[in-house]
Image: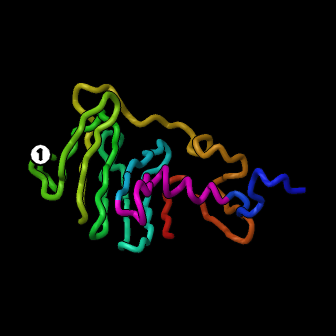
Amino acid sequence: FWDMRASHNHCMMGHLDEWFYSQLGGIRNEGVAYDSITIAPYFAPDLSWVKTHISTVRGDVNVEWEKDDDKTILLNVSIPFGAKASVVVPNTFHITERGNSLDSAKGVRGVVQEAQNLNISIGSGSYRFLMSIKADWNFSFTKASCLQALSVPCATEENFKIGKLQYYYQIKNLELVA
């Protein structure tokens, strides 16, 4: 029975895939055909690194992050030609781009400091942000369960199947390519 109010043409659990890209990698289309992109990765406590990649009509959008320890994250971002992006990260970090302050980093168009986030406007190109916890912050990554963050009861460290697609989910490593 279809009451014409909701679509019955969707893939089962397709939102899980999308969550990996839009939340863990933080890649979100904000314009037309990825001409404006938001990069707002979720630095999950139980993950040590994430690699995400989306091919768009403008080119590839890549986001990779890796925790060196409980106080440092390396964030690599690539934005295709003709696109602009906002990189949104927690305001608990001191951030440099290839060793330069954000004020003098090539390609960084502006920085807006908000109450809880830092919004970095960038143009097309590749960026390498080193993020270190500010010395005056008493902060470290807690060991919360990433499986709880996923809110998917069937997600385990073992293989699990959704429809005809098979995902391998491993707590410490996650690589996604669209």
From the image, which quarter does the N terminus lie in?
A: bottom right
Residue at image position (53%, 56%) is: 20
Residue 77 location (% of width, % of height): 31, 60
Residue 10 location (% of width, % of height): 71, 62
Q: Is residue 28 one of those drawn in magenta? A: yes
Residue 39 location (% of width, % of height): 37, 52
Does residue 31 lie above or below 53 as drawn? above
Task: Identify the residue position indicated by label 1 in the image.
Answer: 103
The crowd level at tag 1 (other Cα within 10 Å; few <14, some 14-19, many 20+) is: few
Please tell me which residue lies in front, 82 or 102: 82
**In the current view of this chain or complex, which residue is farthest to the right?**
1
* Location of residue 66 by image quarter: bottom left
Please tell me which residue lies in front, 149 or 168: 149
Residue 47 location (% of width, % of height): 48, 49
Residue at image position (49%, 53%) is: 22
Residues rendered magenta in the picture:
14-35
Q: Is residue 15 one of those drawn in magenta? A: yes
